[in-house]
Structures are given as C-alpha cells and as structure tokens.
Image (spheres, helix red, strand yellow):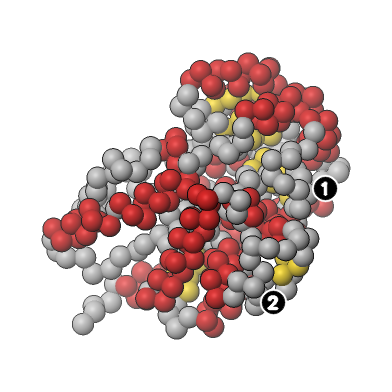
Amino acid sequence: MIASDDKPANIRFVTIPTNAIPSVPNRTAGFPGFFEAVSTKLEAPFQQLMGRLDPPVTAIIADTYVRPMSAMVFHNFDDLRIDNEYYPSGSGEKRVVHIPGISSTRISDHLPTVVFSCEEGMRVLNGVLEMCPWVLKSQYLLFASVYELEHQVFDVLKGKFSFPVYTVGPTIPPSFKFNLGVGVGDESPSSSSVPTITTTATSGSHDCFPIGTLPYLPHEKVEEIVIALRISDVRFLWMAGSTDHKANSQLQEACGDRGMVVPWSDDQLKVLCHPSIGGFWTQCDWNSTLQAVFAGVPMLTFPTSWDQISNSKKIAEDWKVGWRVKSPEAAWENIVSREEIAELVKRFMDSESTKEMRKRAEEVQEVCRGAMAKGGSTDINLDAFLSDISQPRR
C-alpha cells in the first residue's frame, strides 16, 4: 500500500459506507458475520459509487473471497463445487487423490471440517462455492502467491481457464525488499517499533518465538498455551491483535517475564524478519504463511478453520518448513496438553533438532525472494498484467 508516502497525482481514494460491516477487531473472530455482511450489504453503495466516478471505471479488481487464499485452496473450492462426492462425510484420514495438481491429501487437511458442524460455517462455505463461477467472467485471475511454490496447481489452472492466471505474491511492502537488489526502503526489520524482547536479543540468536493472533480459541485453551510456553522457558512475543487493554494486561500477567504481549499484529512481518526470531506459532492464514516464508522462519502450525487447515498441510508436508502442534485428524477443540506443547516448543527452538527444517526454510525463502527480484516470476507477471490492462480498449 502507499502508506504515508505522498500520493501520486493520478491516484484517488474514495470510500463507501461501511457502517454495516463488523469493526476490525471482530472480523476474524466473527468471520461468518463479516463475510455475510460484505456479500449482502455492499452491493448498493458500491454501485452508487461506480455511477458517480468521473472518468468512469474501466477495470475492477475484486477479491473473490474477501481474504487472500492459496491457489491450492481456490482449486479445492472450485473442485468441491463441481464434484462433491467426498463432501462432507468420510474419515479424516481418508485420502483425496483425484484432484489434478494437488498431492494426495487427507480429508481432514483438504476440507475446512472445523466449520461443517455449525450453521454459520455452512452458509459461508456455500457462499464461497457460489462465488467460484464468477471467476469465469473475469479477464484475469491474480493470486497473492509464488508460482514456484505452487507450480503444479498453477499449471492446471492455466490450462483450465482461457484468460491469464498471474502469481503476484507475496504482497510484501517495497520497503522490505532490502536485500533483493531492487530498491532499498527506509524501513528495516530492526526498526524501533519492534518490541524490546526482540531488539535486545543477540543478533542471530534465534531464541525468540512470536505467537500470531488466536481469535477463535476459548479462554481456557489460550491459558493452556500460555502455561505451556512458560514451562518451556522460551522467550516469546504474543501479538494479540486486540485493542482490549484489560484482556491484554491479563494475558501479559499470565505470560510472566519470559513473554511480552503487544496489542497489534500489523508489524508481524517486521518481527518475523528480525534476526532473533527462531520460529513462529501461526494459525496459518495465507498472508502470515507467506510472510514467514519470506522471512525464512520455520513454523509451528495451529490451524483452527477454513483455509488454515490446508495451509498447515502445505507448510508441514509439502514445503517441510514446519511442524504441526497437533495431528491433522485431531478435532480442533482437543488441544494437546500443556506438557506436550512445552516439550514440542523446546524441541522446535533447539537448533540441532530442527537443523534440516531450518535449512529447508532458507531454501524456500530464496525461492520466494527470487520470484520478487528483477526477472523473477512475480516481477514478470506484474509487468505483464500492468502492461496489458494499460492498453486502450475498444
């Protein structure tokens, strides 16, 4: 995004009323309500805006799913819409093997089973499946992904659609391209906004462990994780992603002196790029997944819903840059014990135990950054897309 930089003269920002949309702190925890509101209450104000813009709009870039997703998850949803023979019944260990471009996958990894039991979740799933055919009306299909990390799926999608399919990820701010040779920004991962728990660490020590937001977990489950982290004696940073000062203060008290709680999650990328970071506990949202890949940080995956479950499989099994906190067939609410989590975190942060995984994380990082560099797949795709949409249309 343009952030605080001076806005180019040929760019305008306009807004539409969003009072019908849930506020930012509630969008993740209350995603079904947010999804339904976006799908049903924004059409009229958006059309009104289109009618009064001058010059008139000639191209629209739309988000099919109101949040980023991998090509694999999009392909899963599109295939599920066409062929639902395995939905939603079947053992979690049963394998789905017939989807072109996707390796053999457990049903428990392939489908967002966590929400199948609730009416809200089913409404969201059906809404997503209804959106898939809209893609056929497009002139381009863009993914915030890296071609080399999902090349088998992209090759299938390119053969499936008559229009161009472009990978334009990861969506990293230009200021973070500090070692790509394509322009250095003023920001760096050692910026003063990174908390003391990381900036006071020894450079390259890899002994700090950030925790991503966990909005879906009930309080008692969060408490169990906090106790486990204290038992592990690992230094950790908890990015709460909440402005609830009382709740954050209580969480900080529970974390003790080995942990630090911060209310934000916007600076997550800056934290992950800090040399003291040795791993990342993540729910596996796609943005967070690609940020960790970009930073070369191995992950402990703890998915709770939707595409997070498929992303966890990709991290642990396909890319081999992380471990699962729990087995894929376990029900999400049946969290492992505090003792098991503490032992897992200690082993995960031990450089000898995870030597091969860390090496693999560095290799995947190079693939990711190579795509962003001049002449890389993302760089070429962005140039091609911008060049094509800039051509006069009759």
Residue at x 43% of width, y 54% of height? 66
Quarter of image, res 368: bottom right
Residue at x 81% of width, y 38% of height? 344
Estimate the x, y position of residue 89 in percent, counting from the top left.
Answer: 68, 63
Mark 1 lies on residue: 355
Estimate the x, y position of residue 100 in percent, counting from the top left.
Answer: 65, 77
Mark 2 lies on residue: 98
Could you tell me which secondary element the residue under label 2 belongs to? loop
Looking at the image, can residue 282 be seen?
yes
Q: Mark 2: few, some, or many residues within 10 Å (few <14, many ≥20)?
A: few
Q: Is residue 44 above or below residue 255?
A: below
Could you tell me which secondary element the residue under label 1 belongs to? helix
Q: Is residue 197 left or right of residue 27?
A: right
Q: Is residue 219 left or right of residue 243?
A: right
Judge by depth and name the residue closer to the eye, 27 or 177. 27
Q: Is residue 16 left or right of residue 69?
A: left
Estimate the x, y position of residue 245 in percent, counting from the top left.
Answer: 48, 20
Estimate the x, y position of residue 192 in percent, counting from the top left.
Answer: 51, 28
